[in-house]
Amino acid sequence: MRIVGGKYRGKKLWAPAGKDVRPTSERAREAIFNIMYSHLGGEYSEMKLADIFAGTGAFGLEAMSRGFKEVTFVDIDTEPVQKNIKLFPQELEKLKVIKADATRLPRARQKYDMVFMDAPYALDLTQKALQQLLKQGWLKEKALCIVEIRQDEQWELPSELELVDERVYGLARVLFLILK
């Protein structure tokens, strides 16, 4: 697993052995950033991202490499993301970690321009976490939420969000949602 674009393109990331953590594939990350670029342009220097169910932090670290102002990682087990953050000592001021259950988020200390969420598949966590983001004030007006779920997973879109794009990559379905 490695960073696929930006300042740290090609830098290898640590990934645990086994199936407890399922990082978003390099191919899917590259495609997601291409879609983001087409919707938002390439100017990320003022954007703040929350990587929910962060796992290894691969998506958030990709965002940091591509110029995001700040990335906050949220996971109940922060060990994998902490190991990868240590690979970027010169970027520590841009990277924050919150150890929390995404289905019971604390009140937001700040609002985010973008959220990436890749919950463990088929455990009904995505919808609960999205409701928490909305309830606890994590999203700026018109925030982009990128949600990865299993391709055949069924869930209900919260009324506060609008689906603007949807793609399938292998077993994953990636939804692009905008806060209305």
Image (cartoon, rainbow, N blue to C red):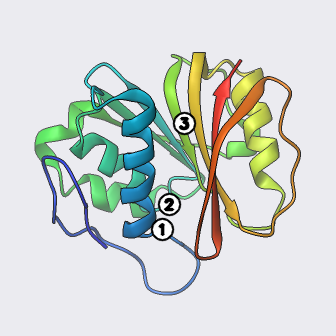
Q: Residues within 10 Å of mark 1 (few under 14, many from 20)?
A: some
Name the kind of residue labelled 2 in the image: Gly
Secondary structure, mark 1, is loop
- Point out residue 31 in the picture as x, y percentages from the top left corner: 42, 57
In the image, residue 107 sits, relative to residue 98, either above or below, namely: above
Secondary structure, mark 3, is strand
Residue 23, numbered label: 1
Alpha carbon distance from label 2 to label 1: 7 Å
The residue mark sitting in front, 2 or 1, is: 1
Q: Quadrant of the N terminus?
A: bottom left
Image point 88% across, 45% down: which residue? 156
Task: In this rendered view, identify the residue nearer to me: 15 or 144.
Answer: 144
Q: Residues within 10 Å of mark 2 (few under 14, many from 20)?
A: many
Q: Earlier in the sequence, mark 1 or mark 3?
A: 1
Alpha carbon distance from label 1 to label 3: 16 Å
Q: Are marks 2 and 1 in contact (CB under 8 Å)?
A: yes
- Point out residue 84 in the picture as x, y percentages from the top left corner: 29, 59
Name the kind of residue labelled 1 in the image: Pro
Residue placed under numbered mark 3 in the picture: 115
In this orientation, does residue 36 appear? yes
Task: In this rendered view, identify the residue nearer to me: 160 or 164.
Answer: 164
Image point 75% across, 32% down: which residue? 132
